[in-house]
């Protein structure tokens, strides 16, 4: 009965759940792709005539994917948590009404968990289907880009499914756990109250974790000119995550402030813009919840682009002469809200280039002479080896 | 005012709600607010009572305490023979399922559900089987049978209020609490809602406690209680809107 209500709620008011859905689906796709890749690598390494160098290369590749998948699941959890925090906060009156007409706290809790289950179901179905469709393309791409010269074959799809589905469901459940507990505490009197102003206050853990994130980002910034190139790359992949966590912690203060600043020039001219600004300023959770998924997803994408260009160039490095402006790296990281990260990355690379001018000399098998901007920095680890 | 012996009220099925020496004090930094200062009153089964009073006189607080949504600081509340003091959150929820219905000024329904599902929801939450015909009969009772498949956003304010009444009608509560049920409605739909309330009381013996500040709305009730400063200061029975307004003015002077 409660599950039917969950399903209906998500179907009728799907908008706030879209962020959680996309983030979960991305996580599931990556997990399933990783499993398929590892499966393919496993199967291929047992074929006779595979050199140990090839095997190491493939293993590196799968661990890189595994790393990305873990990160994206972690991010998805944050997105789910912020989505459901938002859903519960904006539905206080409705949840109070439910309590009033006879829903027990446990039923309210099951309602919220059920909603996250519905989102998780949709996301895992879409994610698994997408991953299954993408796997041949990914394997082809790896070969085409010269990452491996081996013929990789995708394993049976159900192996990936059986791992990705529990991962997606678990992440959704964990993400909505706290929100469901808060929902259960809604008093029936909330049904009678105006949806008053939300308080803009940080909890203890929010300030501790948020402060830690700011500290990490600050440290990396200060040290960015001095860190090793390989380390710089790892940092550039991890930093967006740290920034996202910081944003989620401080989001209740940060996003309404930014939104009202952004709206200021329009607000002076137009009354509806002014209304929108005031709404954003007072309803803390709305901008925070809408911004969190965007920030998180772009950071997953940014980190992914970095990692992929890194992977591709791991084996197919290129000549220094063809390097140009770092367009892709820059864009990927900026989308991630990780401008600082890309800064650190760029400096790391520049620094490295000046130190090891002949990094590309042992390169082999780069096909075509097309300058590929995104490989600029990815050259670093090779030189570092 | 007389004191009610609890065991007498508990066994007397002619009493829907009994308040005995109820006070409610809100503590705040600026000082205590005495929202209710000793209310003793019996709402007999089948009665339709309006509660009137100036803003801040404690009308909403009285309703919430009577419904167990807020706890009395002192005194006793009995609903359908059950003393509310000492009931757990879950016990109170169960009691609300079987004994109480609610209609407020607005936002009484779940937007995700159709009118039909909204009416059936309390029974479903209680784990009961829902007979389609009964739900439709409740909707027909308030003139909403044709719009059973609509969702609240597709209904007017008055239609939404009538669906909320159908929900209360379907679960057959011992008492229906209404706080300004016509407060957000225009005259015509307000009158329709009041007529439904009156006929629920007259034809089904539904006990109704309705808070309002509108003398016209109060005139639909059998009796009107006047509240001022957290106390009952007057009462009129079977009065018309003019008499009620006159009494109001008199008490406010
Ligand atoms: N949650 C609360 N905290 C503090 N004071 C309250 C609270 N609710 C109501 N009051 C105070 O109690 C008094 C009665 O309020 P209420 O019952 O809402 O009056 P009415 O419904 O008649 O306008 C008012 O003075 C109000 O300010
Ligand atoms: Mg009131």
Image (cartoon, helix red, strand yellow):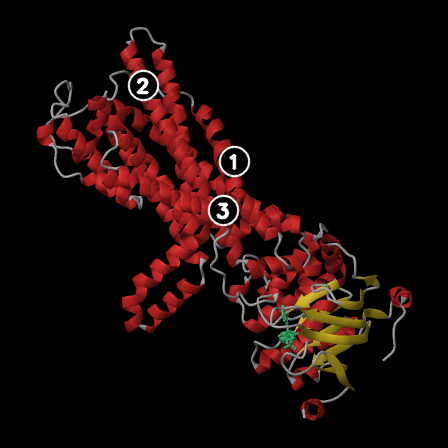
Q: Residues within 10 Å of mark 2 (few under 14, many from 20)?
A: many
The residue beneath circle 2 is: A58
Left or right of residue A197: residue A229: left
Q: CA distance from mark 2 to mark 3?
A: 41 Å
Q: Residue at x 41, y 25 (%)?
A: A35
Q: Is residue B158 visible?
A: yes
**Location of residue B177 in the rendering, given as x and y in whole percent from the top left corner:** 70, 70
From the image, state whether disc 2 or disc 3 is nearer to you. Answer: 3
Q: Earlier in the sequence, mark 1 or mark 3?
A: 1
The residue beneath circle 1 is: A170
**Location of residue A280 in the rendering, given as x and y in whole percent from the top left corner:** 40, 62
Left or right of residue B59: residue B152: left
The residue beneath circle 3 is: A205
Contact check, label 2 and label 1, Cβ < 8 Å: no
The secondary element bearing badge 1 is classed as helix
Chain of the residue under the numbered disc 2 shown in the image? A
Chain of the residue under the numbered disc 3 shown in the image? A
Q: CA distance from mark 1 to mark 3?
A: 23 Å
Instruction: State the image quarter where residue A307 is shown.
Output: top left
**Location of residue B245 in the rendering, given as x and y in whole percent from the top left corner:** 68, 90
The secondary element bearing badge 2 is classed as helix
Q: Earlier in the sequence, mark 2 or mark 1?
A: 2
Q: What label does residue A270 carry, if any?
A: none
Q: Residue at x 36, y 10 (%)?
A: A46
Between A187 and B121, the residue placed more toward the observer is A187
């Amino acid at each position: 009965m409660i599950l039917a209500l969950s399903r209906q709620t998500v179907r009728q008011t799907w908008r706030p759940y879209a962020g959680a859905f996309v983030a979960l689906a991305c996580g599931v796709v990556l997990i399933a792709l990783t499993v398929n890749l590892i499966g393919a690598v496993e199967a291929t390494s047992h074929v006779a005539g595979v050199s140990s160098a090839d095997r190491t290369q493939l293993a590196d590749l799968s661990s890189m994917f595994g790393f990305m998948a873990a990160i994206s699941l972690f991010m998805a959890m944050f997105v789910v948590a912020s989505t459901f925090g938002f859903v519960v906060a904006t539905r206080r009156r409705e949840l109070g009404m439910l309590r009033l007409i006879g829903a027990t706290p446990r039923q309210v809790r099951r309602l919220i968990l059920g909603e996250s289950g519905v989102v998780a179901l949709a996301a895992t179905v879409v994610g698994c289907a997408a991953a299954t469709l993408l796997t041949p393309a990914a394997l082809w791409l790896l070969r085409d880009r010269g990452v491996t010269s081996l013929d990789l074959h995708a394993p049976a799809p159900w192996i990936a499914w059986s791992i990705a589905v529990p991962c997606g469901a678990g992440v959704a459940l964990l993400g909505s756990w706290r929100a469901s507990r808060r929902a259960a505490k809604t008093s029936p009197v909330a049904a009678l109250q105006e949806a008053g102003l939300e308080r803009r206050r940080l909890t203890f853990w929010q300030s501790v974790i948020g402060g830690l994130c700011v500290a990490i980002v600050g440290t990396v910034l200060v040290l960015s000119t001095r860190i090793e190139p390989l380390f710089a790359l790892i940092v550039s992949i991890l930093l967006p995550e740290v920034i996202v966590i910081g944003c989620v912690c401080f989001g209740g203060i940060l996003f309404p402030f930014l939104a009202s600043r952004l709206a200021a020039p329009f607000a002076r001219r137009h009354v509806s813009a002014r209304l929108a600004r005031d709404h954003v300023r007072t309803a803390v959770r709305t901008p925070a919840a809408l911004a969190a998924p965007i920030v998180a997803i772009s950071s997953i994408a940014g980190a992914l682009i970095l990692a992929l260009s890194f992977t591709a160039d791991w084996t197919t490095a290129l000549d220094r002469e063809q390097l140009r402006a770092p367009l892709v790296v820059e864009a990927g990281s900026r989308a991630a809200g990780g401008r600082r990260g890309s800064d650190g990355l760029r400096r790391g690379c520049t620094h490295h280039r000046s130190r090891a001018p002949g990094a590309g000399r042992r390169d082999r098998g780069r096909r075509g002479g097309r300058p590929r901007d995104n490989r600029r920095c990815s050259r670093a680890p090779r030189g570092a080896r | 005012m007389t004191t009610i012996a609890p065991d007498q009220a508990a066994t007397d099925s002619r009493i829907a709600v009994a308040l005995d020496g109820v006070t409610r004090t809100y503590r705040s930094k600026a000082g205590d607010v005495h929202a209710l200062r000793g209310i003793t009153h019996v709402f007999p089964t089948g009665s339709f009572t309006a509660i009137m009073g100036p803003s801040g006189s404690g009308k909403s607080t009285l309703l919430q305490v009577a419904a167990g949504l807020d706890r009395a600081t002192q005194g006793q509340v009995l609903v359908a023979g059950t003393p509310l003091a000492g009931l757990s959150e879950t016990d109170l929820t169960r009691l609300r399922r079987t004994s109480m219905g609610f209609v407020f000024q607005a936002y009484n329904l779940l937007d995700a559900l159709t009118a039909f599902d909204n009416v059936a929801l309390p029974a479903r939450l209680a784990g009961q089987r829902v007979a389609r015909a009964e739900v439709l009969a409740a909707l027909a009772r308030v003139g909403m049978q044709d719009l059973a498949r609509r969702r609240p956003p597709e209904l007017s304010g008055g239609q939404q209020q009538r669906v909320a009444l159908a929900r209360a009608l379907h679960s057959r509560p011992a008492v229906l609490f209404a706080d300004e049920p016509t407060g957000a409605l225009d005259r015509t739909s307000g009158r329709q809602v009041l007529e439904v309330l009156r006929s629920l009381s007259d034809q089904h013996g539904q006990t109704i406690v309705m808070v309002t500040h509108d003398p016209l709305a109060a005139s639909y009730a059998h009796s009107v209680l006047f509240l001022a400063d957290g106390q009952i200061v007057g009462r009129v029975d079977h009065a018309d809107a003019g008499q009620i307004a006159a009494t109001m003015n008199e008490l406010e002077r």
